[in-house]
Image (cartoon, grey):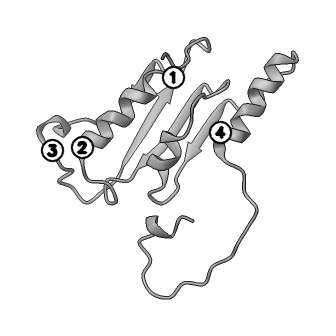
């Protein structure tokens, strides 16, 4: 459930839907590559109302994804250390990462009232997580 991530208050109605994890969807790219088929997913754009960190932490491999764009919800996770940890993990998969970092390194907690958009690119699809 994403209820813990929402900023909506009050008694909300809940609708249950069938879903697949992003990791399971991305693994289909790996299956396609193994059988000589073209990978279908090369670009991922995420805006999950604050659930981005939980999703990003659970991706073990970005099977064929060349570009990732996501909103980092500082309004829900203000600790800058968590942001730097997230970037460290992403750098294992993506060789280029862009964000507006003006003054970010000077704070232990996000001092502004906005979120940030992070752009990641993998130019070498052989980059993968290193144990």
The answer to whether the residues at label 2 and label 3 have Cβ atoms under 8 Å apart is: yes
Q: Quadrant of residue 122?
A: top right
Number of labels in the image equals 4
| Left or right of residue 101, residue 115 in this image | right
| Left or right of residue 4, residue 75 in this image | left
43 or 127: nearer the eye?
A: 127
Separation of marks 2 and 4 at Cα, in angstroms: 25 Å
Residue that carries the numbered disc 3 in the rendered image: 108
- Circle 4 — which element? helix
**Residue 81: horizontal and vertical position, in percent?**
25, 40
Mark 1 neighbour class, 10 Å CA radius: few under 14, some 14 to 19, many 20 or more: many
Q: Residue furthest left?
A: 106
| Left or right of residue 74, residue 39 in this image | right
26 or 121: nearer the eye?
A: 26
Q: Quadrant of residue 7?
A: bottom left
Tell me which label, 4 or 3, sits earlier in the chain: 4
């Amino acid at each position: 459930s994403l209820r813990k991530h929402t900023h909506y208050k009050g008694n909300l109605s809940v609708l249950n839907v069938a879903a697949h994890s992003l990791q399971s969807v991305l693994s289909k790219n790996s299956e396609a590559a193994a059988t000589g088929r073209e990978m279908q997913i090369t670009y991922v754009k995420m805006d999950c109302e604050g659930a981005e960190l939980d999703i990003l932490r659970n991706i073990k491999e970005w099977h064929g994804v060349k570009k990732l764009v996501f909103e980092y919800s500082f309004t829900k996770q203000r600790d800058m250390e968590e942001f730097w940890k997230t970037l460290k993990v992403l750098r294992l998969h993506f060789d280029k990462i862009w964000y507006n970092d003006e003054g970010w390194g000077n704070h232990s907690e996000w001092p502004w009232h906005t979120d940030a958009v992070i752009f990641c690119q993998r130019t070498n699809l052989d980059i993968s997580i290193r144990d």
